[in-house]
Image (cartoon, rainbow, N blue to C red):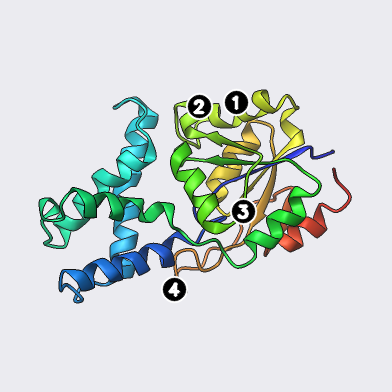
Amino acid sequence: MTIKALAFDIFGTIVDWRSSIAREVDRFLAEIGREDVDSFVFARAWRDFYQPRMADCRSGARPYTPLEELIAEALDETLAANGIAPEGLGLGRRIHFVHAWRRLDPWPDVVEGLCLLQARFPLVALSNGNLALTMHLARHGGYRWDAILGAEVAQTYKPLPRPYDQAVDMLSIRPEELCLVAAHEDDLRAARMRGLSTAYLHRPLEFGPDEIHLPEGDWSYSADNLRSLSEELSGQG
């Protein structure tokens, strides 16, 4: 098996969404005098509140809606759950807060690791993030993609088949020649069902030190960081 391109999940795999959002939440809560709210709990709730909206898009209960719109809806729900009136933010502050998801920091190994991998493989983003969000994340983090694919291009969310199938078609390669790199096994399982190769990237702190996830599947590759993955793939390309 020869890998000809690598596709990457973004949230949790490339960027540390939890700590980055908590940092932005801390700033916001300090501005409004609500330091009593736990910023990490707020961050997790914000993410949890947009997940059912993605599920509605997958099921057809609502048409495909870009992730940043779902994030904005979920923000209002998270604010209300914490006794904060969403309408009190004002349009400018609300947009800035929603765009916190464009300012997520990459994990420490990402910039160097992607450079190592990019020397041998085309790298594509295969994310549920919309194009603008994914583009701004890369610019903020100091890394780049050869292409941005995923949910907005496919008009549906992973782990439905279309984003994986479309990536293979658009790259003009066979499914097994595209390797999905992800920290989430549901993503990897869905990719494997479409014939893709898979690489599990262990991110033990994605949900914090009290919620540790260990790999259960038998993936094509497994690594603790991108440098290790590059070494594991050293015979490819």
Residue at position x 71%, y 30% from top? Answer: 175
User: Can residue 223 be seen?
Assistant: no
Q: In the structure shown, which secondary structural element does the residue marked by tag 2 occupy?
A: helix
What residue sits right under mark 4 in the picture?
210
Residue type marked 3: Tyr
Q: x, y (%) of residue 182?
A: 60, 50
Q: Which mark is residue 207?
A: none
Please tell me which of labels 3 and 1 falls first in the chain. Answer: 3
Q: Nearer the viewer, mark 2 or mark 4?
A: 2
What residue sits right under mark 2 in the picture?
154
| Cα–Cα gap, marks 4 and 1 | 37 Å
What residue sits right under mark 1 in the picture?
166
- Determine whether 135 is above or below 89 in the image: above
Position of residue 236 in the picture relative to residue 36 (left or right): right
| Cα–Cα gap, marks 3 and 2 | 23 Å
Residue type marked 2: Ala
Residues under numbered marks 1 and 2 in contact, where contact means CB atoms less than 8 Å apart: yes
Residues under numbered marks 2 and 4 in contact, where contact means CB atoms less than 8 Å apart: no
Residues under numbered marks 4 and 3 in contact, where contact means CB atoms less than 8 Å apart: no
| Cα–Cα gap, marks 2 and 4 | 35 Å
Q: Quadrant of the N terminus?
A: top right
**Closer to the camera, 213 or 78?**
78
What residue sits right under mark 3 in the picture?
143
